[in-house]
C-alpha cells in the first residue's frame, strides 16, 4: 500500500499502530484520486468581550470511552533502543476515525516516511517532506494539524523533538481563532505568539520576541504580515510551516508564496478545502509549494499534464485525445496520492444532523427586467461585447449582479425614481428573502447566517432587520480583526438572542464556525466556486446539533444563473483531480458555448440551468427526500420542483409559495437535496466491502490453482 514505507537508517521499521487494522476500507482508500467509489460591525444585541472565554465549540467534558492509542511509528533509535511515537491521549480521545487516518497520513509525509515515485522521465524518486490536506470544510483539518504539530514539537525518531518552532500562516481574520484552537485542544500547554496587530511596530516587536522566546513554540501570523516581515525570521529555528486556507497561494509568483519559500524548512503542511479553483496551473502552484519539483517544472507540467488533460475535456475532443487525457490524469493522480489527502463531506453525514440544500430561482420584477435590458442595450455594453474587453466587461457584469439583488444598488435614473422603502423597491428576491426570515422567526427558534458578496446588499438586509426589531451581528471588511473573533464566539452561545449573522463572503467566508445558526441564506453567487463552498460550509460543521437548511438564491435567466453554470464547469476540474477522476453527467453536458452567453437575459424559462441539464427523468419532481444518492455535486441527482411544487419543508413552503404585490408567485423553480446518513447506506457500503473481500478470496483460490497470469494477479491484488 502507498502509505507503508521505511525510514533511514535501514533497521528502523515503521510500525502500524493497533488502530490500523480497524480502519474502514472507505477511509483507508480515500486519498487523492484513488478511492473505492461510493454509490463594520453592527448589531442590536450587546457584545461581550469574549477574548478570555472558552470557545463555543469546546470539547465535550463529560465521560468518554477510552480511545485506542494512536501509534504513528515504532522502531529503533540510532543506538538500537526501541522507541514509539504515540499521539498524546488528550487529543486521541477527540479524534474521529477519518481524523486518525489523516493524522497518520500527514505525519508520514512530514517526517519523510513516504517516498514520491516519479515517472522515469521526471528523474529519481524523492523523499516526501510536505503535505496538502485537502479535506472538505468541516472535517477537522485544524484538529488534525494541531495533533501532528503537538506530536512533532514533543517527539521524534531519536527521542527528541522533531520540530523546534513552527509557524501557522492564515488569513488575518483567523489568527485569533487559531490561538483559541491551540488553547482549547492543548489545554494551555503550547504557548503561542498570535500576531493580529495593525501597528507595524507591534508586529516587528512580536516577530523579534518570538525568535528568542524559549516558551513560545508557535507563531500565528497573517499572510500579509509574513510577506512584509519574513526576513526577521531568518535566524529563527523554524522546522514546520502550516498554511491555512492555502488556496490563497494559487499563484507561485505571488509575493506571499515567495515569502513562504524563503523559510528554510522543507516541512510544509498546506490546508485547503478547495485546492483547485480555476485551472491546473493553480493546482501546480500549490503542489510545487508543498513539494518542489513534485510535478516537475512549470513548462514540462504544462506540456505533459495540463494541456493534454484540458484538451481531452473539450466536447470536441477525439477518442485518442480523451484516452491520452485519462492516462495523464491517472499518472498525475498517482503522484499526488503520495502527498495529498482528500475526503469529502459525505463523512460528515455520519456524525452530523441532516442537511437540506435548496437552489431557489426567482423571476425578476418588471423594474429589474426593464433596467436589465437597458444595460444590455446600452452603447457602452454593446461596445464592450464587440471588443471583448475583459476589464470593461467585468464592470458591466458587476452592475448586472447588483441589479439582480436590488435595483437601488445601481445608479440609474429609473432606480432613483423607485421608492426608498425596502418593501417597495421592486425586488421579488428581497421579498422572498424577507419571507424566509420572517417565517423562520415566527415558526421556530432557528437562527440565520445571511451571506452576500456585496456590502450594499448587506446594508439593505440590515435595514430590514432593524425595522423588524430583530437582533443581528454583522461581519464585513470594515470589522476590525480584534472584534471578529468576539462576534463569532458570542453568536455561537446557545442561548443567544441574536437572530441573524450578516456575513460578507469576501471578509469572513473562510474558516469561521457559525454553528449557532442552522439556516444559511446565500444571496448571490461568486465566479469562484471555492468562495461559495467556503461560505456555504459555515453551519454544517462539528458541534452542530440541529437540522441544517441551506438556501442558494438565483435570479432566473440572468447573469447569476450563468455564473452558477460556470461554477459547475470549474468544479468539475476539482472533481477530476482531487476526488476520483470521474465527472457527473451534469458537468459533462455543460458546454463552453452555454457559458459565453453572459450578456443575455432569458425571460422565457422557469430555470435555464435545469434546461441545460437536459433532465431525462420520467417524473421530474419529487420531494426533498426523494433523491436516492447523497451526491450534492450532481444536480441531476437532486429533486426538481417547477414553481416550487412538492417542497415539503414548512418554512420553505411559506416562502416559496408567497406572492408579490401583483399576486404573482415569487419563485419559478427549486432544486433540493436531503443529505442524511441512513442505515441503508451503511448496509450498502458493507455489502460492497464484503463483495470486494469475496473477490479477493476468489482471486487467491484461482492463484493457488495456477490459472491466472501472474501479472494480472498482482494488479487485481493491488486494486483490492
Image: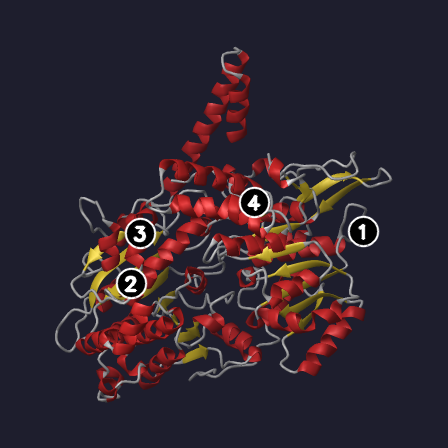
| Foreground disc of the pair 1, 3 | 3
Q: Secondary structure at mark 2?
A: helix
Residue located beneath label 4 in the image: 336
Question: Are circles 4 and 2 on residues that touch, CB within 8 Å?
Answer: no
Instruction: Give whichever of discs 3 and 2 has the lower sequence position.
Output: 2
Q: Secondary structure at mark 3?
A: loop
* Image quarter (top left, top right, bottom left or bottom right) of the N terminus: top right
Residue located beneath label 3 in the image: 591
Instruction: Give whichever of discs 4 and 2 has the lower sequence position.
Output: 4
Instruction: Give whichever of discs 4 and 3 has the lower sequence position.
Output: 4
Q: CA distance from mark 1 to mark 3?
A: 56 Å
Q: Is residue 346 left or right of residue 127?
A: left
- Locate residue 404: give its quadrant: bottom left
Residue located beneath label 2 in the image: 561
Residue 683 visible to the viewer? no
Per the rendering, the mark at residue 160 is 1
Question: Are circles 1 and 2 on residues that touch, CB within 8 Å?
Answer: no
Amino acid at each position: 500500500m502507498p502509505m507503508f514505507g521505511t525510514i533511514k537508517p535501514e533497521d528502523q521499521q515503521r510500525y502500524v499502530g493497533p488502530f490500523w487494522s480497524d480502519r474502514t476500507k472507505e477511509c483507508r482508500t480515500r486519498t487523492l484520486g484513488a478511492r473505492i467509489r461510493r454509490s463594520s460591525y453592527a448589531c442590536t444585541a450587546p457584545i461581550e468581550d469574549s477574548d478570555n472565554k472558552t470557545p463555543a465549540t469546546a470539547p465535550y467534558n463529560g465521560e468518554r470511552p477510552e480511545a485506542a492509542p494512536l501509534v504513528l511509528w515504532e522502531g529503533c533509535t540510532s543506538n538500537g533502543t526501541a522507541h514509539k511515537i504515540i499521539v498524546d491521549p488528550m487529543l486521541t480521545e477527540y479524534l474521529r476515525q477519518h481524523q486518525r487516518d489523516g493524522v497518520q497520513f500527514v505525519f508520514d509525509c512530514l517526517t519523510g516516511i513516504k517516498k514520491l515515485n516519479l515517472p522515469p522521465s521526471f528523474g529519481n524518486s524523492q523523499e516526501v517532506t510536505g503535505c496538502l490536506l485537502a479535506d472538505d470544510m468541516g472535517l477537522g483539518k485544524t484538529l488534525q494539524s494541531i495533533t501532528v504539530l503537538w506530536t512533532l514539537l514533543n517527539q521524534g525518531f531519536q527521542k527528541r523533538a522533531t520540530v523546534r518552532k513552527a509557524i501557522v500562516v492564515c488569513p488575518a481574520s483567523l489568527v485569533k481563532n487559531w490561538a483559541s484552537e491551540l488553547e482549547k485542544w492543548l489545554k494551555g500547554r503550547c504557548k503561542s505568539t498570535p500576531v493580529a496587530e495593525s501597528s507595524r511596530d507591534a508586529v516587528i516587536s512580536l516577530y523579534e520576541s518570538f525568535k528568542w522566546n524559549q516558551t513560545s513554540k508557535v507563531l500565528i501570523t497573517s499572510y500579509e504580515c509574513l510577506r512584509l516581515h519574513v526576513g526577521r525570521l531568518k535566524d529563527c529555528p523554524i522546522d514546520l510551516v502550516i498554511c491555512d486556507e492555502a488556496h490563497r497561494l494559487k499563484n507561485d509568483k505571488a509575493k506571499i508564496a515567495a515569502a513562504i519559500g524563503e523559510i528554510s524548512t522543507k516541512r510544509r503542511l498546506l490546508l485547503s478545502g478547495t485546492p483547485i479553483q480555476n485551472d491546473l496551473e493553480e493546482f501546480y502552484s500549490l503542489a510545487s509549494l508543498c513539494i518542489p519539483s513534485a510535478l516537475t517544472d512549470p513548462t514540462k507540467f504544462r506540456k505533459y499534464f495540463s494541456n493534454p488533460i484540458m484538451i481531452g475535456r473539450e466536447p470536441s475532443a477525439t477518442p485518442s485525445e480523451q484516452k491520452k487525457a485519462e492516462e495523464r490524469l491517472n499518472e498525475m493522480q498517482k503522484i499526488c496520492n503520495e502527498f495529498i489527502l482528500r475526503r469529502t463531506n459525505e463523512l460528515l453525514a455520519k456524525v452530523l444532523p441532516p442537511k437540506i440544500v435548496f437552489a431557489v430561482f426567482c423571476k425578476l420584477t418588471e423594474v429589474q427586467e426593464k433596467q436589465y435590458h437597458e444595460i444590455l442595450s446600452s452603447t457602452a455594453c454593446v461596445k464592450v461585447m464587440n471588443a471583448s474587453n475583459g476589464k470593461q466587461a467585468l464592470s458591466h457584469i458587476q452592475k448586472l449582479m447588483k441589479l439582480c439583488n436590488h435595483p437601488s444598488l445601481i445608479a440609474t435614473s429609473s432606480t432613483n425614481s423607485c421608492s426608498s422603502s425596502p418593501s417597495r423597491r421592486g425586488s421579488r428576491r428581497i421579498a422572498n428573502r424577507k419571507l424566509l426570515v420572517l417565517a423562520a422567526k415566527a415558526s421556530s427558534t432557528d437562527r440565520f447566517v445571511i451571506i452576500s458578496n456585496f456590502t450594499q446588499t448587506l446594508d439593505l438586509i440590515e435595514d430590514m432587520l432593524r425595522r423588524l426589531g430583530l437582533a443581528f451581528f454583522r461581519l464585513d471588511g470594515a470589522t476590525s480583526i480584534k472584534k471578529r473573533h468576539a462576534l463569532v464566539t458570542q453568536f455561537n452561545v446557545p442561548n443567544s438572542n441574536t437572530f441573524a449573522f450578516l456575513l460578507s463572503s469576501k471578509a469572513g467566508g473562510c474558516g469561521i464556525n457559525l454553528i449557532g445558526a442552522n439556516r444559511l441564506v446565500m444571496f448571490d453567487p461568486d465566479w469562484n466556486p471555492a468562495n461559495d463552498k467556503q461560505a456555504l460550509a459555515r453551519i454544517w460543521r462539528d458541534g452542530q446539533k440541529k437540522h441544517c437548511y441551506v438556501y442558494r438564491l438565483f435570479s432566473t435567466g440572468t447573469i447569476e444563473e450563468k455564473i452558477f453554470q460556470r461554477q459547475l464547469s470549474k468544479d468539475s476540474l476539482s472533481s477530476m483531480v482531487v476526488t476520483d477522476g470521474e465527472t457527473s453527467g451534469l458537468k459533462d453536458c455543460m458546454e463552453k458555448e452555454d457559458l459565453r452567453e453572459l450578456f443575455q437575459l432569458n425571460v422565457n424559462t422557469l430555470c435555464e440551468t435545469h434546461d441545460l441539464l437536459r433532465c431525462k427523468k420520467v417524473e421530474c419532481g419529487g420531494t426533498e427526500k426523494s433523491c436516492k444518492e447523497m451526491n450534492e455535486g450532481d444536480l441531476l441527482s437532486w429533486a426538481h420542483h417547477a414553481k416550487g411544487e412538492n417542497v415539503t419543508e414548512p418554512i420553505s413552503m411559506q416562502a416559496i409559495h408567497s406572492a408579490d404585490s401583483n399576486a404573482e408567485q415569487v419563485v419559478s423553480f427549486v432544486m433540493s437535496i436531503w443529505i442524511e446518513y441512513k442505515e441503508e447506506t451503511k448496509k450498502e457500503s458493507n455489502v460492497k466491502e464484503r463483495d470486494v473481500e469475496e473477490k479477493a478470496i476468489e482471486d487467491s483460490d484461482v492463484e493457488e490453482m495456477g490459472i491466472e497470469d501472474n501479472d494480472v494477479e498482482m494488479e487485481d491484488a493491488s486494486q483490492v
